[in-house]
Image (tube, rainbow, N blue to C red):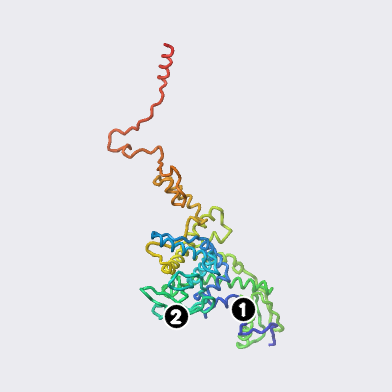
Amino acid sequence: MNWKFWQKPSTHEIKSSELSKWGPLLELGVLANGTITARTASGALAAYRQSSAVSVPVRMIAADIAMLEPVIETDGDVDQGRQALALVALLNNPGENWLKDLFFETLSIYQSVTGNAYIWAGGNISRPPLAIGPINPADLSIDHDGNGTIISFSVNMGPYRGIYQAETKNGRTRYIANGFAELTQIRGFSSRTGGIIEGESPLVSVGAEIEQMIRGNTHNNALLSNGGRMSALFSLKGDLSDEQFDAAKAEIFTRYKGETKAGTIAVVAAEDVSIQEMGVTPKDMDYAKMLILARNAVALQYGVPPVLISQEKSTFSNMDTGREMLFDNGVAPSARRLFSGLEAFLFPRFGLDVETSKLTFDQLAVPSLRQRRVKELNERRKANVETVNELRTSINREPIDGGDELYIPATMIPLSLADDPDDDEPVVMPLPDEPDGNDEDEDEDEEDDG
């Protein structure tokens, strides 16, 4: 048998310039069994960069968190109020390289994608920080003793690089570098460590769905780029030994198998090889349905209603409901975790008491909750247990004259005058006097007599 494939020989060495040809799977990381993993921060962030099914719901949550207005509720004295204002000012202006919206958006994306958010604070560690900034979890490594105690964080890249050693004082552990920089970690749950050392990316449990989308997109792009067909049958003619057949099959697989080589045009020079195009079944063409199911799975993992990521079944009505569900199930939990972490990190630096103060956000400034607030105010007004000024105070409005009077419907009567089933005779409510027709006749008679 004499046959030859006209194609550049493959190589086991992958150059950086060829990464795009091999697709995003190399960047994301593939386990020995071929399964994509998001267990590392770099792998999870690669999934975010390469899959819109991940980036769209994550950015939805991050965009809403970036619009939240941080506030501090405090019952402390004037000095506590002054320190609270200073902390809110820092959150609204984190540092030279960070605007408030970008700071919170970045923290939210890191937390949603990797399960961890890391914050740097610069300045004398005994005073309020001069600036704060988010740290990329992929640039960081953790040294621990194996029993759940973190010894240090090492930031290997970026402007915040350094080794942040654990220092425990008065029952509080802080991670300090050179006395002028501090790092804190906000982590979520982990099925591996129970959330003791670091959080786990939510993408771990939907790794199969992400793998389907990435491989499917890579296959389709390669099919368009290479210009060939989806599938074909190679027929090796002649009397081949097992070794010859295995060698030919291995060579064909090397050159034409895989999503990155979909549609590769095979050109051969041999009398004993023929190529036959294979038909495409409906199952082969059902990529769109698979994509929808995978997108929904990832969206639900983040608490994002599928109606917000698909335009097919969206209406003005369910879009409003979907926005409320997005806040309740996606934005609010992520925001509370971030704000709780910032509170634990920054309150001691500003001398704020966690017993009398709380870092939160102004829900009245959330656009997606306007309809809910209007409905709630109407229900509270109809309940007749609050005055107008009490309702206005709950939405940060100034009181008005006459707003301290409680109004009730005119048809309501005291309970003591209501019917008592034990009484033989019902209580009859007195009615106002009404003019009688006979009285009018008597008045006319009197006029005639006059």
- Position of the N terminus, as image quadrant, is bottom right
Number of numbered markers: 2
Question: Which element is circle 1 on?
Answer: helix
**Residue 215 shows up from this direction:** yes
Q: Nearer the viewer, residue 444 or 330?
A: 444
The first of marks 2 and 1 along the sequence is: 1
Residue at 60% over, 87% down: 242
For label 2, the residue is: 143
Which amino acid type is marked by label 1? Leu
User: In which quadrant of the rendered view does residue 265 lie?
Assistant: bottom right
Residue that carries the numbered disc 1 in the rendered image = 19
Percent of width and height locating residue 281: 62, 68
Q: Tag 2's secondary structure?
A: strand
Q: Which residue occupies the foreground of this view, 1 or 356? A: 356
Q: Are marks 2 and 1 in contact (CB under 8 Å)?
A: no
Position of the C terminus by quadrant:
top left
Kindly identify the residue that appears in the image at 41 percent across and 39 percent down. 409
Residue 336 at x, y percent in the picture: 45, 63
